[in-house]
């Protein structure tokens, strides 16, 4: 038994000695890099933004990676931040009602500590992510990786945004409620309406989550936090400020099939890659004056209906009313029915004539 333990420890030590991590910590944002990897090499990639400015100083980075790895020996990706870590594998296998779907390209946006920055009262740039990539494949596996910022991350009201997603490339954005005092008069941004439109039939999930980490942005966990709805072409959600005092994340995840939108096990679109085009806009809810005006208009319409109905009924009743007149025909008195006449028998007194002897 001791001999087997020594052999196992020796094997582990040799395996560790043969493992060669390769560190590249001078990689830049917005550049696509290609690497090879085997089971005895681990790539540790450090990214830094050399052109950082005030527009993206407070924006979380997005990691895009693509590879020809197989399901039996996938790539294991771990993205590290100072206080957070995100991991996934490539290819990504997504379960659906019509079976498993495999995707060779994955894009993930790292979580951003909005609440921490809000409490600090100022913004500070996050340190670039440290990405490690490894595999169990004995043969060379190629992969390409890029770290960049989203075109837009902070949403503003009354502006239409256009973007696209896939089941393996979700996206999420941040919206912070603006006080009504900073906007035009008679506006209500204490409650906003999120409108989503699309020109295709691909099913997706729209989730509203609070601004804490982690962000649930995969098909397996997107429904675990906040509230959500499934959308294919048009959808909308009303979001009150009292539920999200620090703002909210709106997460978009495409479904691998269209079952949850149509109850049909299959695809309503011929788009094999499941690329969905989306347009979203955030609008204010109705104001208090508009709410009161709508109530009074409704009551006025109901009252007007009853007034018109009552007048119409009254006029029709008066016009169609004909008073009755009683006319008596001369000598036309009712006779007593014969069945009611009772005949009485009159008895006459009988006269008795006596015979007398005349003498």
Image: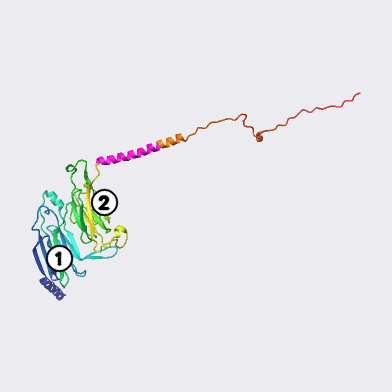
| Residues drawn in magenta | 288-310
x, y (%) of residue 169? 20, 60
**Location of residue 355 with respect to 51 vertically, above or below:** above
The single residue placed furthest to the front in the displayed view is 319
- Residue neighbourhood size for the residue with mark 2, other residues' Cα within 10 Å, grouped as few (<14), some (14–19), many (≥20): some
Position of the C terminus by quadrant: top right
Q: Residue at x 15, y 51 (%)?
A: 115
Is residue 221 visible in the rendered structure shown here?
A: no
Give the main secondary structure of the magenta stretch.
helix
Would residue 216 be counted in the magenta stretch? no
Is residue 148 shown to the viewer in this render? Answer: yes
Q: Nearer the viewer, residue 94 or 243?
A: 94
Q: CA distance from mark 1 to mark 2?
A: 37 Å
Residue in the image at 40% along x and 38% along y:
309
What number is the disc on residue 144? 1
Residue in the foreground of this view, choosing between 228 and 288? 288
How is the rendered protein coloured?
rainbow
| Res 236 label | 2
């Amino acid at each position: 038994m001791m001999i087997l333990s020594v052999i196992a420890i020796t094997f582990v030590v040799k395996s560790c000695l043969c493992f060669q991590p390769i560190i590249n910590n001078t990689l830049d944002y917005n550049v696509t890099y290609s690497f090879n990897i085997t089971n005895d090499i681990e790539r540790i990639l450090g990214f830094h933004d050399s052109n950082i400015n005030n527009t993206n100083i407070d924006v979380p980075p997005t990691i895009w990676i693509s590879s020809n790895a197989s399901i039996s020996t996938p790539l294991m990706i771990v993205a590290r931040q100072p206080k957070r870590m995100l991991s996934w594998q490539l290819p990504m296998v997504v379960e659906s009602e019509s079976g498993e779907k495999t995707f060779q390209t994955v894009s993930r946006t790292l979580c951003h500590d909005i609440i921490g920055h809000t409490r600090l009262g100022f913004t500070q740039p996050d340190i670039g992510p440290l990405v490690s990539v490894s595999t169990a494949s004995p043969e060379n596996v190629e992969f390409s990786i890029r770290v960049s910022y989203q075109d837009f991350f902070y949403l503003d009201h009354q502006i239409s945004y256009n973007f696209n997603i896939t089941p393996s490339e979700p996206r999420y954005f941040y919206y912070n409620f603006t006080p009504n005092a900073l906007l035009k008069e008679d506006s209500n941004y204490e409650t906003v309406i999120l409108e989503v439109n699309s020109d295709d039939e691909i099913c997706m999930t729209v989730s509203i989550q609070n601004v804490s980490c982690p962000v649930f942005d995969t098909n397996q966990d997107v429904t675990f936090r906040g509230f959500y709805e499934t959308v294919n072409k048009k959808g909308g959600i009303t979001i009150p400020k009292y539920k999200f005092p620090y703002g909210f994340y709106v997460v978009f995840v495409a479904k691998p099939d269209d079952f949850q939108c149509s109850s049909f096990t299959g695809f309503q679109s011929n788009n094999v890659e499941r690329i969905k085009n989306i347009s979203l806009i955030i609008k204010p809810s109705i104001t208090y004056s508009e709410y009161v005006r709508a109530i009074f208009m409704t009551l006025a319409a109901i009252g007007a209906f009853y007034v018109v109905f009552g007048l119409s009924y009254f006029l029709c009743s008066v016009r169609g009313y004909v008073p009755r007149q009683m006319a008596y025909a001369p000598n036309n008195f009712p006779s007593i029915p014969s069945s009611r006449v009772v005949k009485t028998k009159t008895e006459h007194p009988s006269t008795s004539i006596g015979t007398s002897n005349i003498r």
